[in-house]
Amino acid sequence: MSAGKAWIMLRQAGREDATPKELGFGTQSLTVFIEDIEAHFQRAKSAGAAIVEDLHETEYGELQYGAEDPDGHHWLFSRHARDVSPDQWGAVVALAQS
C-alpha cells in the first residue's frame, strides 16, 4: 500500500487474531501524513470510506481526518497546517521520573 512517497507494509490478521471490530475497541491508531489532505479526504468520502472524524484543524495546528477500515482499525490522515505554540493549546511538559 502506498501514500504519496510512503510505502506502508500490512499483514493480514491470522485466524487466531481478533480484529478491533471483533474485540469491540481499537487496538492502535496509525497516522499517515498527506500533503494534499483535502483531496485525499474527498476521495476517501467519495469511495465510501467510513469517516470517523471529519476534516478539521486541531488545536495544535494539524489539518486531519480519521477513517476506520472494515476490521475496525483507526487511520488518521494529517497535514501540518500552522505553527502553534504549545502554550497556546495547553501542552504540559512531563519529566520522566527515575
Image (spheres, helix red, strand yellow):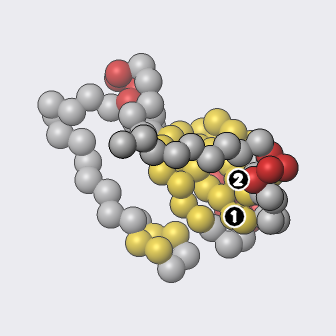
Horizontal side, residue 36 vs residue 34: left or right: right
Q: Secondary structure at mark 2?
A: strand
Q: Quadrant of the C terminus?
A: top left
Number of numbered discs present? 2
The residue wearing badge 2 is 64
Residues tagged 2 and 1 counted as in contact (Cβ below 8 A): yes
* Residue 48 in sight from this viewpoint: no
Q: Label 2 is placed on what type of residue? A: Gln
Expressed as whole percent of the image width and height from the top left, the position of residue 26 reads 44, 31
* 62 relative to 2, above or below: above
- Considering the numbered disc 1 on the image, is that residue within a helix, a strand or a loop? strand
Frontmost residue, 75 versus 14: 75
Is any atom of residue 44 visible in this view?
A: yes
Q: Which residue occupies 48% across, 51% down?
A: 30
| Residue 89 badge | none
Residue farthest along the front direction in this orientation = 98
Label 2 packing within 10 angstroms: few (<14), some (14-19), many (20+) = many
Name the kind of residue labelled 1 in the image.
Answer: Arg
Q: Tag on residue 79? A: 1
Q: Residue 28 placed where, x, y %?
A: 42, 40
The answer to which of 64 and 44 lies nearer the viewer is 64
Per the model, the C-alpha gap separating discs 2 and 1 is: 6 Å
In the rendered image, the vertical position of residue 18 relative to residue 51, given as above or below = above
Q: Residue at x 70, y 53 (%)?
A: 64
Of the two numbered discs 2 and 1 on the same chain, state the one appearing first in sequence: 2
Percent from the top left, x then y, of residue 84? 81, 59
Neighbour tally class for label 1: few under 14, some 14-19, many 20 plus, Cα within 10 Å: some
